[in-house]
Image (cartoon, coloured by chain):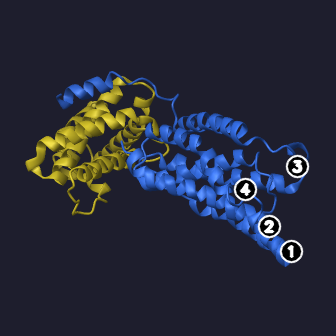
Amino acid sequence: MVRSLAGDAAAYATLLRRLNGHLRAYYLRRLGSGRAADAEDLLQETLIAMHARRSTYDTTRPFTAWVHSIARYKLIDHFRRNRRRAEEPLDDMDQLFAVSDSNAVEARIDVDRLLQRLSAKSRRLVRDVKLRGLSTVEAAQQNSISESAVKVGVHRALKSLGAEIQDEES
Amino acid sequence: MRTDDLIDALASDAVPSTGESVGRTLVLGLALGAVVSIAVMVLWLGVRPDLMPAMRTGPFWMKFAYALSVAALGFGLVERLARPDGDGGVFGPMLLGPLGVMTALAIYQLWGASEEARMHMMMGHTYQVCARNIVIVSAPIFLGLFWAMRALAPTRLTLAGAVAGLLAGAAGTFIYAFHCDESAAPFVVIWYTLGIAAVGVLGALMGRSLLRW
């Protein structure tokens, strides 16, 4: 979002696409799947509102809280307009970002993309131990290196990935 | 319109938006309103004729300090509540500060005054018009602020309207104080506060409909 505010169109498009998935799931869950058209309208309305009022995002505060507040406001506004009472508690900030209909795909793409940045050897170790679920001993045998070399290799690889993710998000 | 197309359209409009911060938008609305408010005060009521000698007295500054401190806290509140995830934070309780100081000063003055002087200290000679005038002088600032707020994103509309009204009332009071020649603290704490609060109540009532987005 910070990059988007600075005018980075590519970063902004990525951000909007991600929010799209989160918000659609959020509205579908709240309105019920029978009201998919309403959910889509609300989703578009929310995206436009966020775009028009993006200057109200304070970069020192969590972006998710800002998005959630707008999404919830638009939902309440929708209920009010349609004279329908919101029966459920609306304070479910965790849930907006907990489920997304594009989450699984997104996660796989992210992981693949990140792994490309590692050396072939570390990439293989991380895949074996963390994704395929091999034990350290099995991985050591398959790669014909010592057990402790596997542990150290995986640890280093994850650490550098962690650092990269943080860079990306800030 | 398909949502994907919408996203493309929005993304292509990703111009840097650093120039239009929340604070700046509010200051613009406040300033535009204040210009009109000053004109209303000067043309309709007139600046008090004894402005120059009065400036050498304490009570003159007391009124401005009161209005200005409430306005500053009000601005802090509005700036936060104009954001979707904003809450009042510490500024709300801090409003009790200026009110407390003024009330203490008023009680102190009443304490040392005679019976008939007390009545005059509370009622002055303009009590019938003071609060009403504050509301009228504040009106342009009220409109300017609400105009600015409509470009922002408050989600607690009644509360946001109330604090915007409070800020407008305090700023209007600051301007009105150039006309008003009352000087007793009891008068100020009763009638100024009433005027500011009245504008705040108006804001709360109108927030729900005026600030919707």
Look at the picture and state if B65 lies above or below B35: below
Q: On what subunit does the disc labeled 2 rest?
A: B
Question: Would residue A55 be found to the left or right of residue A49 on screen?
Answer: right
Outermost residue toward the top?
B12
- Camera-nearest label, 1 or 4: 1
Amino acid carrying label 1: it is Ala
Q: Do labels 4 and 3 share a chain?
A: yes
Gap between marks 2 and 1 measured at Cα:
9 Å
Residue B121 in the figure: left or right of residue B153:
right
- Numbered label attached to residue B66: 4
* Residue type indicated by callout 3: Ala
C-alpha distance separating marks 3 and 1: 22 Å
Do residues under tags 2 and 1 come within 8 Å of each other at their CB atoms?
yes
Q: In the image, are marks 1 and 4 on the same chain? A: yes
Q: Is residue B176 visible to the viewer in this orientation of the structure?
A: yes
Label annotation for residue A69: none
| Circle 1 residue | B113
- Tag 4 and tag 3, C-beta contact below 8 Å: no
Residue corresponding to mark 2 = B121
Given residues B132 and A12, the one toward you in this image is B132
* Colour chain B appears in: blue
SS at mark 2 in the image: helix
Q: Do the residues labelled 1 and 4 touch (CB within 8 Å)?
A: no
Between label 4 and label 2, give the one nearer the viewer.
2
